[in-house]
Image (cartoon, rainbow, N blue to C red):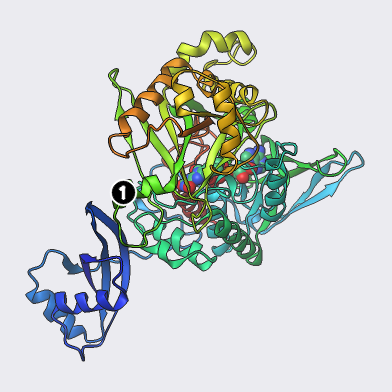
Amino acid sequence: MIQIAQIKCRPDEGAEALRTKVCRILHLRREDDFSMQIRRKSVDARKKPDLFYVFTVDVMLNDPGLEQKILGRNRDRNVTRAQEVRYTLPSAGTGQVRKSERGGAASGISAENQNSSCREAIDESGEKLCGQMESLRPVIVGTGPAGLFCGLSLARSGLRPILIERGQSVLQRTESVARFWEGGRLNPESNVQFGEGGAGTFSDGKLNTGVKDAFGRIRFVLETFVEAGADPEILYSYKPHIGTDVLRGAVAHIRDEIIARGGEVRFSEKLISVKPAGKAAGRSDREIWEIVTERQQRDREPETLKTHLLTDVLVLAVGHSARDTFRMLYDTGLSMTSKAFAVGLRIQHPQGMIDRALYGAECPYEMPPAPYKLTHRLPDGRGVYSFCMCPGGYVVNASSEEGLLAVNGMSNHDRGSGFANSAIVVTVSPQDIRGYLSDIRKEHPDILSGNRPDPELFAGVEFQRRLERAAFLAGRGAIPVQTFGAYRESLRSPESMAEAEAWKTGPKFRGQYAAADVRSILPEQIAGAIEEGILAWDRQIHGFADPSALLAGVESRTSSPIRIERGEDLQALHFPGIYPCGEGAGYAGGITSAAVDGLRVAEVIAALER
Ligand code: FAD
């Protein structure tokens, strides 16, 4: 197979033009039989108004002799032999893991335990009890991209995983989130952060990632989404995007396959405790864990049902918002550290303004809504940057705790809202947080004092909560919104209230919103950095700093403030058989990298000797 890079086509040129260019580059004749597949498509807008799509294509020639001949005489550095890496799961039970994952003791379970199944019973108090232990199945906590792809892999390896998810199935969740956005009560167990598909279900569904991939895992993730209903263009687009409306169906499709292969997916069921339950028979290195889950039946009587399960493989793919679960795992003794994360606001502009900046005012072509990525270095060396930009999207109320408010962005597949939004954020390190500690300590003496070995570990979480509480109060429960003009003057003026009325026909929110003093939500150092960044970016995107640009707060869930330590064998330190996974554990940032981490963990588990 031959690969050709850097083939430029005007946006109004079709597939035939691309084929003609391939023939010209490879000196093919009309009668030469070949097929081609696009590998990458990006936009080159450097010489506006001349715009190009730039393609990389793989060319399959039916005559292998001809391929040799072409490559033999080739002097064009854009023409090479195509290197295709196909993703494969390591053979189950071989004890062999990929080189990059080797490093710790990959242990297995005994044959006696392997062939049994965990039966549950319900005792008189309504507690489900694990009865006779007949088999141990892998348990995965969380059905975000990390848990879902880990589960899919294990199911395809024949390991029949049990997936436990505190939130609702995607259908029920979509309904309850819609009720919340229309002014109903927040369900703290099933919302934009929690539920089937995880935090990314109500998202823009950007699938690009910066992670390196020598094994074809990213391609596998994208192919799985395509099998599950996504547009095949995600396989080659330089910025693949799936969209909330399509992602919901894709998530349900993956879940159905896990179940069809013997897996189990339990919704509205939360992991509430983990404790050691002895060693696997004949394997002193193999720990058995007893986990307890609680079924939430909030929609009916406030009734809880406890279930006990035994397992020797527990994957913790709980995402970055499971603050109560982090706390429970910390109390269980899992080793954790605090890490840097970013906080800020979401900014919203008309999409046409962004398109003009990227494609030029006189762009004659119909182009997709343009994305942007902006960074600015402040005089003190800190950076302010745009994050999770959603072309043609909506700013959403992404809260998960009562009395607190966080925002994020989403879009549908068509990115057709007419408005662009992105987070404008500043990184806060654990050292920065220490600067806020004295205030936090006054508010939460229980969290930051006492006999914990690291009383500052949860300071990042409390800092996020503090900002979210301020946002909730500023907007009186609705998303607080302020024009950039008013923000610069710290005004929640009558003018901005009037503007708020006008916004109703314009900018796009999912959730109630209200005019407020958004600036007051953030520490002034961060608020000022955001202002400086926005002003600087006006030079790149004319109108970015327009006084009518809308700011909404607070963007606090950019990544996890905590990392659950794991060894090179991907197991939690000193907790054999427990696998911290995905974004919440601190090993991913975004849908695709979380899915890739889920695959890595599944590979290690599938390879365990049995
Ligand atoms: P999560 O997706 O957070 O999944 C964790 C799951 O675990 C949740 O479903 C949760 O309910 C469950 N859980 C937690 N605790 C328990 C417990 N105790 N018991 C049982 N279940 C539990 N990323 C992108 O790459 N592109 C985007 O366009 C994008 N847009 C986003 C838009 C929004 C509105 C949000 C909120 C996030 C967005 N993200 C985006 C980020 C992306 O969603 C996350 O990076 C990704 O979902 C992380 O995957 P994960 O599987 O590690 O965790």
From what the image shows, is residue 224 above or below residue 439? below
- Give the camera-side residue of 463 and 482: 482
- Give the camera-side residue of 544 and 164: 544
546 displayed left or right of 265: left
From what the image shows, is residue 344 above or below residue 398? above
130 displayed left or right of 535: right
Label 1, residues with CA under 10 Å away: few <14, some 14-19, many ≥20 = many
> Residue at (65%, 37%) from the top-left corner?
512
Q: Horizontal and vertical percent for residue 401?
A: 67, 31
Outermost residue to the right: 124
Element type where label 1 sits in the image: helix
Q: Horizontal and vertical percent for residue 260?
A: 65, 67
Q: Horizontal and vertical percent for residue 353?
A: 38, 45
Quadrant of the image containing the N terminus:
bottom left
Quadrant of the image containing the C terminus:
bottom right
Name the kind of residue labelled 1 in the image.
Answer: Leu
**Total numbered labels:** 1
**What residue does disc 1 label?**
358
> Residue at (30%, 51%) from the top-left corner?
361
Residue 452, image quadrant: top right
258 displayed left or right of 75: right
Q: Horizontal and vertical percent for residue 126?
A: 88, 41
Residue 533, image quadrant: top left
Q: Quadrant of ligand 1?
A: top right
Q: In this view of the protein, can residue 317 be seen by the observer? A: no
From what the image shows, is residue 411 above or below residue 343? below
Q: In this view of the protein, can residue 270 be seen by the observer? A: yes
